């Protein structure tokens, strides 16, 4: 038996063709392509195609999620009923995903052919924005809006949530956020989804498990807390003292630090550019705070190299694009579901269950004695 380091940190537990993260270099890639460059230059549909079908358009046909976004009638009713009673969009998302899979008989991956798994992957990722936007509108007493298959995934998500077509700038900024967050190595939610997939369970089951991991504030739950933090700090000149107080109280500074990156998080760089293009006083204020927070963190743990992570600038981009704050973490699920589906296919195709061990550290065991 070998003992893994705490949190499995630095341990390679699988092989993947889907991408990787080089923390020391501040670099990540989707398959063999520089992912930050894809976020700057490509559409979400291009990157969706890369993940699921293995190459970028126009070399192969682009995935069109438009016609797949519509919910089956019974599922739309169920999502509306859930949204009327539940506050958390991520709870409704889990219900909606399981409902679509059930109504459409999307069975255990163990029993699905590669073509059927691809079909599951596209369909389940496509309905995520529809479910989330419906939840938001129903909760706010607004009429749900059906998808427009002619629009791109990002623009249609914003339209279904807000009720009005987004500006080109806002749609592109959110699309860049989505492209930048499709996949990111063996993060907690991807690992979770792959563990479920390794049992041969259905794809929706694996995605719902991924959603659970993503809700954690140390993973995907950070962006709404980041914007709340920016509000709480108020002005950049208060950031230094505020950060020192938080650290002294043993609290985490949201939007900073990363399990892998020791150089600047390249997603944060892309999103800072996107925020600057959207403009406004929030951008300058956030930049001033970022600088001061980084300085305090560097003085606090000089050897750890705690960097700005994706969530800090994501929160600014999503705020400037007009998304309600309650939708920040759910928006992460819009893109990450695409990544999970590709990982589920890869893991299910490997056909090996993930089943590590734990060392018992309780009171001495007395064999044959129960009291
Ligand atoms: N605030 C306070 N402390 C932090 C921190 C932060 N933002 N980021 C790192 N640290 C601390 C860690 O807790 C760790 O402390 P320890 O040595 O006492 O265990 C130390 O700095 C080194 O951390 P590191 O090994 O670099 O990262 P990690 O894998 O332990 O933690 C996170 C990674 C993401 C969980 C952590 O940075 C964090 O909690 N960040 C805030 C939440 C956030 O923004 N999450 C989104 C991630 S994309």
Image: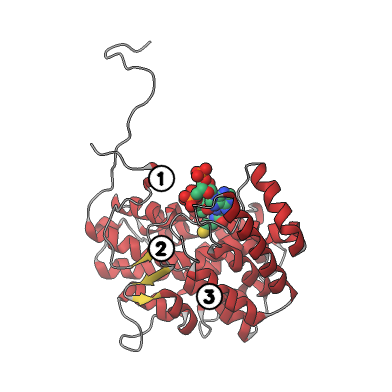
Q: Say which residue appears at 44% left-offset and 64% top-offset.
A: 337
Whether label 3 lies within 8 Å of ligand 1 gets the answer no
* CA distance for labels 3 and 2: 18 Å
- Front position in the image: 197 or 111: 197
Considering only order in the chain, which callout, 1 or 3, is on the residue closer to the N terminus? 1
Whether label 1 lies within 8 Å of ligand 1 gets the answer yes
Looking at the image, is mark 1 or mark 2 nearer the viewer? 2
Circle 1 crowding by C-alpha within 10 Å: few under 14, some 14–19, many from 20: few
Circle 3 crowding by C-alpha within 10 Å: few under 14, some 14–19, many from 20: many
Q: Say which residue appears at 69% left-offset and 80% top-offset.
A: 279
Q: Position of residue 342 (x, y in %)?
A: 35, 66
User: Dot 1: what SS?
Assistant: helix
Taking 116 as reference, is 96 left or right? right
Q: Which residue is labeled 3 in the image?
A: 270
Q: Which residue is labeled 2 in the image?
A: 24
Looking at the rendered image, the quarter that the C terminus falls into is: top left
Q: Position of residue 237 (x, y in %)?
A: 76, 62
Q: Say which residue appears at 47% left-offset and 78% top-offset.
A: 39
Q: Which residue is labeled 1 in the image?
A: 7
Q: Is residue 17 visible?
A: yes
User: Dot 2: what SS?
Assistant: loop
Q: Circles 3 and 2: CB distance less than 8 Å?
A: no
Looking at the rendered image, the quarter that the N terminus falls into is: top left
- Front position in the image: 264 or 162: 264
User: Dot 3: what SS?
Assistant: helix
């Amino acid at each position: 038996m070998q003992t893994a380091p705490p949190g499995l940190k630095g341990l390679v537990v699988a092989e993947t063709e889907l991408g990787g993260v080089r923390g020391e270099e501040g670099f990540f890639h989707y398959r063999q392509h520089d992912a930050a460059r894809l976020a700057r230059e490509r559409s979400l549909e291009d990157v969706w195609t890369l993940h699921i079908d293995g190459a970028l358009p126009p070399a192969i046909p682009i995935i069109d999620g438009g016609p797949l976004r519509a919910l089956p009638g019974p599922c739309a009713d169920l999502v509306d009923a859930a949204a009327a009673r539940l506050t958390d969009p991520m709870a409704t998302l889990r219900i909606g995903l399981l409902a679509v899979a059930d109504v459409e008989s999307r069975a255990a991956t163990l029993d699905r052919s590669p073509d059927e798994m691809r079909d599951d992957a596209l369909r389940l990722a496509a309905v995520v924005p529809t479910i989330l936007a419906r939840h938001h509108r129903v909760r706010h007493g607004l009429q749900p809006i059906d998808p427009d298959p002619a629009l791109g995934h990002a623009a249609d998500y914003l339209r279904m949530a807000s009720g009005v077509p987004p500006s080109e700038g806002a749609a592109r900024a959110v699309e860049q956020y989505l492209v930048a967050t499709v996949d990111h190595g063996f993060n907690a939610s991807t690992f979770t989804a792959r563990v479920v997939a390794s049992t041969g369970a259905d794809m929706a089951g694996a995605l719902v498990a991924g959603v659970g991991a993503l809700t954690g504030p140390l993973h995907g739950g950070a962006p709404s807390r980041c914007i709340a933090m920016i509000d709480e700090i108020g002005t950049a000149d208060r950031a230094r003292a505020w950060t020192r107080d938080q650290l002294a109280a043993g609290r985490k500074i949201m939007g900073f630090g990363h399990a892998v990156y020791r150089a600047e998080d390249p997603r944060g760089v892309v999103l800072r550019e996107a925020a600057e293009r959207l403009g406004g006083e929030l951008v300058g204020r956030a930049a001033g705070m970022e600088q001061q927070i980084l300085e305090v963190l560097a003085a606090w743990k000089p050897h750890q190299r705690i960097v700005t992570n994706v969530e800090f600038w994501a929160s600014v981009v999503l705020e400037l694009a007009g998304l309600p704050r309650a939708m920040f973490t759910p928006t992460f699920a819009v893109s990450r579901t695409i990544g999970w589906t590709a990982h589920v296919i890869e893991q299910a195709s490997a056909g090996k269950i993930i089943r590590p061990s734990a060392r018992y550290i309780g009171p001495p065991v007395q064999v044959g004695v129960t009291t």
